[in-house]
Image: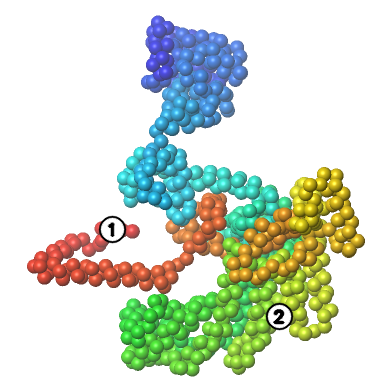
Amino acid sequence: MKRQSKSAATSSGANPKSTSSSQLLCFFSINTSVGESTTPITPHEGTSTATPEVQGTQATELEDDGSAESILEALKRKERSDIWNHFERDMVDGRIKGKCNYCGKIYYADPRKNGTTSLNNHMDRCPKYPPNIEMMKAKRQKIFSFKKPTTELCTVECTQEELSMLCVEYIILDELPFSHVEGEGFRRFMGRALPYWRIPSRKTIAKDVLQLYLGEKEKLMDQLSRYRLSLTTDTWTSIQNINYMVLTAHFIDDNWVLHKRILNFCVIPSHKGEAIAKLLEDCLLEWGIEKILTVTVDNASSNDVALKELSRRMGDWGVPNAVLHEGKHLQMRCVAHILNLIVNDGLSVMKMFIGAIRNAVRYVRSSPQRLDFFKECVERVKLECKGLVILDVPTRWNSTFLMLERALKFQKAFDRMVEEDACNFCAWLEGAKGEKPKEGPPASVDWQYGEQFMDFLRPFYEITLKVCCSNSPTVHSTFGDILSIYGLLQEQKNPCLSEIASPMQDKFVKYWGSFDKMNHYLFIAIVLDPRHKLEKVVDYFEILDDGDTNENVEANTKTVKDLLYDLYKVYEEEGRESGVGEVVGSQVSSAGTSSSCKGLTELEKRLKEKEQRRRAMKAGIVNNDVDRYLGDPIEGDGEDFDLLNWWRVNGVCKYPILARIARDVLAIPVSTIASESSFSTSGRIIDPYRSSLSPRMVEALICTQNWLRSENVYLHHMPTVEEMELCEEAEREMLKMSCGAAVGSSRSGMLPPKSKPSKSKTSSFRA
């Protein structure tokens, strides 16, 4: 096409140097009328330019009318390049531009200044130009690979775009910096593994991250619009001293699979309740979420203010039942945080009894030499424990439990260490002059106290792990776990443990001491468990009232049952408006009754159904899912019972409206761990070396990572003791192998060559 432009310009027979003064004057006048600079433009090689005579003609034609339409029309009449079959001229801000007919990309296209070189170059790489698409299909890179189930060799095809998008997902999922793609090692590896792949730059990766985030967000918005969501939220301050708020949505889909998705990780101006409520409302409006069930938060007083304000704001939206029961049950307090407060009140008393064990563990972990000597003691007493002792964190009671659990397994090793290293250990306990002596070494009574405290803390630890599980429903068993904690605190007869349990019991009563202090959806979830139903709720109330009159038990049971009926009415109305979950009279009939209708005409079936409905009304049976569900027998409590699968199989066909209630209620989270876990991710993304990331990019990285991982949410963690031991064992094996090789070579008369001393005092490799 470029050659055609040149030949067309030459075939006019005019001399380019024979330009009259009047023609040049007209040339500059047309430039001024369009809004361009009056500096003459030198034609570039390879561009399509008109001869001076043509330029003079264009100027003469456009002298009278300098409008954009007349200029574009005149240029269209004088088009000489075939490239304009693929572009459309337009006037933007006084500049003539060309827009691609396929991908919509815009280039400068002034014939006297820009030419058509950029347009021709674009057509060679336009991703939506049909010949280019066919060419890319023909050039799909084929890679040899093995089929997963077998060892059969096959070829896998992939395009440049697919590889680039996989690279973006790789950067997001593994929390790598954008500059990773420009690293020497990565490029060397990719040059051998995928030599035909054009590695994108860090700028391209950043753009693709935002593009992927927006695409995944649009898909998720469409999915969330079909459910009433339960939310968790929490706040966090980064190393940049910027306050962030995270918002996570929890829901059960139509296949009865529990999901959690991080919706927002955005900057919040302050931790005040009004600011939290406003930002929550903005996030809900951004996602188009109109109906929520609960919001799980920690025990900060600002959250109480925030959720009251949010309930008021959502009430002004004009959406029916945006918040149920006027927000009375909107707030769900985090069970894990309350357990943490309860245990911490008793931990202050417990610390004085386990100080000797803690100091022994601290001594072992204080230096590598002491740790090696302790390992020798473990081997001498022939303990088969593979782990090592760990030191607790003063602010985390669960670490104290893990420290006691691990230290008790190595009691014999500690005793041997005290015997053989008593001098050094006692000197360390005494400390330097002026320091307060440390408690220790641990005696037999200390180990007895440690074992008692470990057994006392174990139920708290197990329940915390249970309520923090976010991949399966926990709301239906939470109240039973709370009652087990209550019984544990009341039944302590050990004098030492009762002293610890007394302040813990006071804290328990503060948050869970009465029926009204708890979110009533906890009891609705128990009723929706077909193994318990309403009978288990009555049993729980009787235990909580501790033998008082049955008036409170009956009143509380009636409150739970009325709340379930109110939910049924709301969901029945919503189902009637949307045409989903209509109550059909034929659903009342059992399997035997439906089989008896076989062979009947349609009219006879309808008459039989009316007769059955009339008999049910006379017997006082209300035709709704709640009564039918409560009247059916209770399911057996097997170990492999799957609650969500039971509702998937039985709920939709037998209790269609109640199944929708169960789908939303069983998705309620009872802890904020789903939101708090994102802070560990954000702490790694906004590290001291990447603190310049904008809040928008941080949100895109954190949310997209969560969405890509879908149900398989992996929480990054610090290396455990077992992992560190595995690395140490591998190093020891490598050391033994190298020593064995050295011994073998010396026996054969071949000594390894001596390494030459480096002339440089500093290492040539810098991290």
Q: Position of residue 678 (x, y in %)?
A: 55, 61
SS class, disc 1: loop
Q: Which mark is residue 509?
A: 2
Q: How is the image coloured?
A: rainbow
Q: Quadrant of the N terminus?
A: top left
Asked whether residue 259 appears in the rendered view, the answer is: yes
Type of the residue with mark 2? Val
Q: Vertical placement of 144 versus 423: above or below?
A: above
Q: Nearer the viewer, residue 635 or 352?
A: 635
- Whichever of callouts 1 and 2 sits on the residue coming sooner in the sequence is 2
- Residue that badge 1 annotates: 765
**Label 1 crowd bin: few (<14), some (14–19), many (20+), radius 10 Å:** few
SS class, disc 2: helix
Q: Nearer the viewer, residue 434 or 451?
A: 451
Q: Nearer the viewer, residue 131 or 487?
A: 487
Q: Tell me which residue sits at (61%, 57%) in the image.
A: 257
Asked whether residue 428 appears in the rendered view, the answer is: no
**Label 2 crowd bin: few (<14), some (14–19), many (20+), radius 10 Å:** few
> Do the CB atoms of the residues marked 1 and 2 lie less than 8 Å apart?
no
Type of the residue with mark 1? Phe
Q: Tell me which residue sits at (71%, 55%) in the image.
A: 652
- In the picture, measured across the screen, residue 109 lies left or right of residue 331, that is left
Disc 1 versus disc 2: nearer the observer: 2
Q: Position of residue 65 (x, y in %)?
A: 61, 14
Q: Position of residue 520 (x, y in %)?
A: 75, 68
